[in-house]
Every structure is written in C-alpha cells, then in structure tokens.
Amino acid sequence: MFTLRVDDRKPVQNPPADRDRVLSGVREIVAADGRESIVHLYEELADAQADADLLQKVQRRYAPVPPASIQHTDDGWVVEDLFLLTWLGSVYLVTRNFDQATYRVGGGISRSDEDVEFIGLTPRGDPEDVAADLDLTVDGESIGANEMEFLWKAYWLATYRDRHDDDLFWDLIERHVQTTRAAEQQRRHD
C-alpha cells in the first residue's frame, strides 16, 4: 500500500488492488510531468475512505467501540489485536502481507491476483441513510456514511465472538494469528 498526498489535503492510502494505478501515476509524473491520473486516483480514494481524524474525535468523545479493543495506525484501526480495519473499510487479519499472493478456497485452492479480505462485512441497511437520519456532527464536521460504516465494522470486530458464535472458527483464527506472529518474530531473531 502507498500513502498519497496531494498538495495540503489529507493523506489517503490505496487498497492493494490499486497498486498498479499508483505506480502508473508516479510513472506519468516522472515521464511527462503530468499528475492528472494520480490526482484522479487520490480523489476517488479520498471520497471512499473514512475520515481518520473525525473518527478519532468520535472515539475520544463517545467511545462507540470499546477503547481497549482498538489501536490507531496509519492504515486504519487494529481491532482486538487480530483485525486490521482500513480507512477504506476493508478487513484483514493483522498478519496479512500485501506483498504476497492471496489464495481463494472453494472447490479447490486457487491463486488470486485480486486483493482478498479476511471477512466481508456488510451492514443491514444503508449507512448513508443512517448518517442522514442521525445527522451527527462533531466539532462542526458531519459524520458521513463512510464513518458510520467504519464504526459499525469496528464495533462488530470488537465483539466478534458475540456477533458470530462459532468458537471453533475463532479459535483457529486466533491460533493462526499467534502462530504467524511467533514465526515472524523468530525469523527476525535468526
């Protein structure tokens, strides 16, 4: 993932699936001193991602997600030390290495060039409608659909065992994260 910043606007991060678009935009800047494609990508991403600063204000003031459950990072929130919830609302295990290929399981195992989330969470109801109905503001800034969906996902992830009652599944996921982290730490020491 790359962090894009255009002029003095807030930084945005691309999802791994847009890596090639970022690189071709950089190539355009270097080769032709043009920046249209990278600015266009920046604007698409800025429109699609939740406002990190606004979410921090909401979390500090109202704590809609248990504060002990989240850790703020440049990429998004790490929830329950297991999940990375990106500012674009994608959910990955914290062990996900975006430089490695991903695989899909279903009727066999196949390599995928697409970015594969750990879990796809879709709220019931439209976050846009919820945001409009609630009409919440914090320090004069409106909480929009991207922020509402982000907070909903963060809360779901913070209470994942209550939301999806499958102890065997979660035990396997937790063990996988612990084992992967231990192996990574061992590689660093060797």
Image (cartoon, helix red, strand yellow):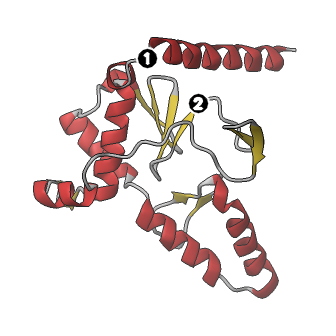
Image position of 5 (left or right of 115): left
On the image, which quarter does residue 105 sit in? top right
Q: Amino acid at mark 1?
A: Asp
Q: Residue extending furthest right?
A: 190
Q: Residue 102 at what x, y percent from top left?
A: 72, 41
Q: Residue at x 57, y 72 (%)?
A: 41
Could one spot residue 54 in this view of the protein?
Answer: no
Q: Amino acid at mark 2?
A: Val
Q: How many marks?
A: 2
Element under label 1? loop
Q: Residue 50 at what x, y percent from top left?
A: 38, 54
Image vertical order of residue 14 relative to residue 107, above or below = below
Q: Residue 176 at what x, y percent from top left?
A: 64, 18
Image position of 83 (left or right of 186): left
* Circle 2 residues within 10 Å: few <14, some 14–19, many ≥20: some
Which image quadrant: the C terminus? top right
On the image, which quarter does residue 129 sit in? bottom left
**Residue under label 1:** 166
Image vertical order of residue 92 relative to residue 36, above or below = above
**Label 1 close to label 2 by CB (< 8 Å):** no
Q: Residue 9 at what x, y percent from top left?
A: 45, 68
Q: Residue at x 65, y 57 (%)?
A: 17
Could one spot residue 171 in this view of the protein?
Answer: yes
Image position of 150 (left or right of 113): left
Q: Residue at x 38, y 46 (%)?
A: 122
Q: Residue at x 58, y 15 (%)?
A: 172
Element under label 2? loop
Q: Nearer the viewer, mark 1 or mark 2?
A: 1
Measure the C-alpha gap from mark 1 to mark 2: 20 Å
**Residue under label 2:** 94
